Image (tube, coloured by chain):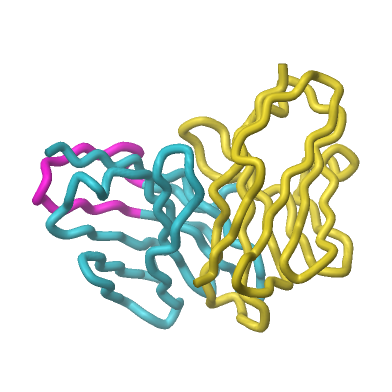
Chain colours: A yellow, B cyan
Amino acid sequence: GAVVSQHPSWVICKSGTSVKIECRSLDFQATTMFWYRQFPKQSLMLMATSNEGSKATYEQGVEKDKFLINHASLTLSTLTVTSAHPEDSSFYICSARLIRTGVNSPLHFGNGTRLTVT
Amino acid sequence: SQQGEEDPQALSIQEGENATMNCSYKTSINNLQWYRQNSGRGLVHLILIRSNEREKHSGRLRVTLDTSKKSSSLLITASRAADTASYFCATGGTGAQKLVFGQGTRLTINP
């Protein structure tokens, strides 16, 4: 149980275009989802907390107009990288926490999306 | 900003040996969690220890937590080649939803 599906697993796009990444909780509902970015051989950097039905909370230094997050349902959150540039190339990972569980509960992660901007 | 510091950054041992990884953090926590990441994949939750717990076991995993030193350790006993991965600690602050991840330890088990 508690499977998170992230799609696509990899994407190559041209500079200036936008890319949408989907994060779905397949067998559970998630009020809260998290989006992370990871550079090679480094840790996960939290970008934003996505709450169903409300605006996302962005971490300091993350441009909300560039990284658009939508959490329209209890099973789907999307991250859109707008006007992508080569420096946006990275590994993006989403995670979700089961609905009605508190902070003392684990996160369930998708398998990540490798974005390459040419 | 990242709160956790992990030590060592990389660890290479022989199959069958025990592997110990350490994590230090800076602020008060509600819980500390350990995750595993295989190369190019997402993270998998291993174990969670609450701030009022000192030790926890799960199969070949043993986690300790010392809140006075703001540190935790993850011990993997009788390591296997399949344990090769990166291991991250993550801390949940009081009342905070989000987790802050440490820098990770890259563990290599040599057959």
In the rendered image of this protein, does residue A23 appear above or below residue B48?
A: above
Quarter of the figure with residue B75: bottom left
On whether residue B13 falls in the magenta region, the answer is: yes
Q: Residue at x 73, y 72 (%)?
A: A31
**Image height of B45 relative to B40, above or below:** below
Toward the viewer: B67 or B35? B35
Q: Is residue A20 above or below residue B16?
A: above
The location of residue A16, given as percent across then percent down, is 86, 22
Q: Quadrant of the rendered structure where residue A57 is?
A: bottom right
Q: Residue at 21% of width from left, 37% of height from top?
A: B12
> Which residue does the image show at 61% across and 34% down from the upper left?
A10
Q: How many marks?
A: 0
Residue A44 percent across, percent down from the top left: 56, 45
Residue range of the region highlighted in magenta in the rendering: B7-22
Please report the residue visible at 84 percent of the width from the left and 32 percent of the height from the top.
A18
What secondary structure prevails in the magenta region? strand
Q: Position of residue A4 (x, y in %)?
A: 59, 60
Q: Is residue B87 left or right of residue A9?
A: left
Q: Which quadrant is home to the C terminus of chain A?
A: top right
